[in-house]
Image (cartoon, helix red, strand yellow):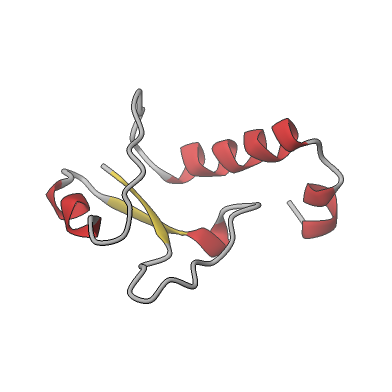
Amino acid sequence: MMTAELTSLTLSGRAEEAARVIRSRTPVDAQTAIVLGSGLGDFADEFENRVSLPYREIPGFVTSTAQGHVGSLLAG
């Protein structure tokens, strides 16, 4: 979906589009999500069948500017 199309959607529409892309790109049928803060990224190294999806490939996600942040959604 193009940026102009995405910005014309409602907030829930943008969230649904991001969720659609995440589901299509990750093989995980997640029931739970964990948002890791700074310094907890090593926890994701323990994920089985880990998939990395760069934020820039997810509609509506912004690139992290935090030093050392991977800038990817990790699923596993």
Question: Where is residue 42 shown, x and y percent of the image?
Answer: 17, 58
Q: Quadrant of the C terminus?
A: top left
Residue at 20% x, 45% y is 49
Q: Residue furthest top?
A: 31
Q: Residue furthest left?
A: 46
Residue at 33% x, 74% y is 68
Residue at 60% x, 43% y is 18
Q: Relative to residue 37, is residue 57 drawn left or right? A: right
Residue closest to the eye, 4 or 71: 71
Q: Residue furthest bottom?
A: 67
Q: Which of the 4 image quadrants contains residue 70?
A: bottom left
Question: Where is residue 27 shown, x and y percent of the image?
Answer: 35, 38
Please determine whether, in this image, residue 17 is positioned above or below residue 30: below
Please determine whether, in this image, residue 57 is positioned above or below residue 50: below
Residue closest to the eye, 52 or 63: 63
Q: How many marks?
A: 0
Residue closest to the eye, 36 or 18: 36
Q: Relative to residue 32, is residue 21 drawn left or right? A: right
Q: Which of the 4 image quadrants contains residue 67?
A: bottom left
Q: Relative to residue 26, is residue 49 drawn left or right? A: left
Residue at 51% x, 59% y is 55
Question: Where is residue 48 shown, x and y percent of the image?
Answer: 16, 43
Q: Which of the 4 image quadrants contains residue 10?
A: top right
Question: Where is residue 61 shown, x and y percent of the image?
Answer: 59, 55
